Image (tube, helix red, strand yellow):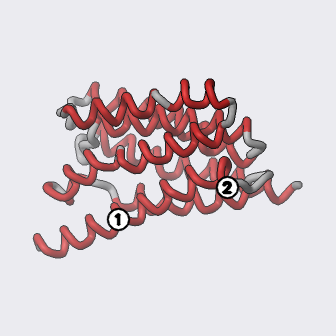
Amino acid sequence: MMYREVLSGMAIALTFVGFVPYTRAIQQKRTRPHVFSWIIWGTTTFIAFLAQLNGGGGIGAWPIGISGLITMYIAWLAYAQKADSSITWHDRCFFLAAMSSLPVWYFTTDPLWAVVVLTSVDVIGFGPTLRKAYALPFEESLTFFIIFATRNLVAVAALEQYSLTTVLFPAATGIACLALITMVQLRRHALS
């Protein structure tokens, strides 16, 4: 259906609208993202994209796939710019949990279980960024997270098939973005 292609195109455009200024902010050292959160998010996002494709998400899955690739680039850029690269034991656990989605998917032959694992890990992967943003709320770009909450809503609307496999990941990460936005706004207000 043509409207799904338009919605997918809009979601992809929002992906770039969000990432381009965020990337520039990292390069200018105005934003210092937590490197390991972005590694986790890039990994989980790209694997979720593959599961969405397998689950019939079609063209509506492509914004998530493109986002996964760009997210891995941001992880590399944050590392190269010497942003927050503190890695805790918990961060390593999040990463290992994300990687566990592949054998879960393989052994169950059902992408839903991979999406459940990935979504859980991705949402928990917000932990290091929430921890950092709570302490340093002026180092995060709220515009970025607003754009991505919106992008996820549009990406869900663009899906060719609606099921827990195709909807769970973008819906949950969109809600996590909204939670981060709210927490940062409250902390900025409290510190002002």
Q: Is residue 85 left or right of residue 104?
A: left
Image coordinates of residue 26 in percent, x first then y, are 30, 40
Horizontally, residue 190 falls left or right of residue 75, namely left
In the displayed structure, 13 sits above or below 79; it is: below
Residue found farthest to the front: 108
Q: Secondary structure at mark 1?
A: helix
Give left or right: position of 17 versus 49. left
**Horizontal and vertical percent for residue 24?**
36, 42
Q: Earlier in the sequence, mark 1 or mark 2?
A: 2
User: Within the image, what quadrant is residue 157 found in?
Assistant: bottom right
What residue would you read off at disc 1?
A: 181
- In the image, which is nearer the foreground, mark 1 or mark 2? 1
Which quadrant would residue 28 be assigned to in this image?
Answer: top left
User: Which residue has dot 2 on it?
Assistant: 10
Q: Quadrant of the C terminus?
A: bottom left
Q: Amino acid at mark 1?
A: Ile
When the figure is inspected, residue 178 is found, relative to residue 130, above or below; the finding is below
Residue 12: x and y in percent read: 63, 48
> Taking 127 as reference, is 108 above or below it?
above
- Is disc 2 surrounded by few (<14), some (14 to 19) or many (20+) residues within 10 Å? some
Residue at position x 62%, y 25% in the image: 107
Q: Residue at the location (41% across, 65% down)? A: 178
Q: Secondary structure at mark 2?
A: helix
Q: Residue visible at 78% across and 52% down? A: 161
